[in-house]
Amino acid sequence: MMSVLMNTIVFEDCRNQWSVSRPLLGLILLNEKYFSELRASLISSQPLPKQEVLAQCFRSLMEGVEQNLSVKNRDRFTQNLSVFRRDVAEALRSDGSPESCGLDMMS
């Protein structure tokens, strides 16, 4: 399920991010090991110049997110996910330069 949601966010036109972010956060918190494996797989599937950019996008996705499902934490994750989706789309379209991702993540 986590893989399907991540692929939807990264590679498809996901119009309702809120409805995807809520179950995704729960899945990530339940199985952090699988999330790490999925992240590594998605990053390694991209050309070498884009891999560090995508790695930064994934780091920024979880920035400020705690290990709970409080409303505040879910809202933070949803905000991060919106920026993550935009930055990943830019990174996949670009040449993979480091300035393409995550430096403007909401605080």
Image (tube, grey):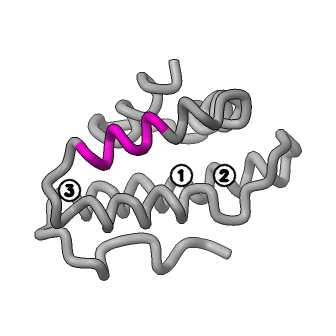
Q: Which residue is mark 1?
A: 81
Per the image, label 1 sits on a secondary structure element best described as: helix
- Give the x, y percent position of residue 93: 15, 60
Q: Which residue is mark 3?
A: 92
Q: Quadrant of residue 100?
A: bottom left
Residue closer to the observer: 57 or 41: 41
Residue closer to the observer: 88 or 36: 36
| Mark identifier at residue 91 | none
The quadrant of the image that shows the C terminus is bottom right
> Within 10 angstroms of label 3, few (less than 14), some, or many (20 or more) residues?
some
Q: Main secondary structure of the magenta part?
A: helix
Which of the two discs, 3 and 1, labels the residue nearer the N terminus? 1
- Give the x, y percent position of residue 18: 60, 40
Please report the residue visible at 51 percent of the width from the left and 18 percent of the height from the top.
1
Per the image, label 2 sits on a secondary structure element best described as: helix
As measured in the structure, the alpha-carbon distance from the residue carrying label 3 to the one carrying label 2 is 22 Å
Question: Which residue range is magenta in the image?
Answer: 37-44
As measured in the structure, the alpha-carbon distance from the residue carrying label 1 to the one carrying label 2 is 6 Å
| Mark identifier at residue 77 | 2
Please state which amino acid type lies under the numbered disc 2.
Answer: Phe
Please report the residue visible at 39 percent of the width from the left and 44 percent of the height from the top.
40
> Within 10 angstroms of label 2, few (less than 14), some, or many (20 or more) residues?
many
Is 13 a magenta residue?
Answer: no
In the picture, measured across the screen, residue 80 lies left or right of residue 43, that is right
Circles 1 and 2: CB distance less than 8 Å? yes
Please report the residue visible at 45 percent of the width from the left and 71 percent of the height from the top.
102
Please state which amino acid type lies under the numbered disc 1.
Answer: Leu
Residue closer to the observer: 82 or 63: 63
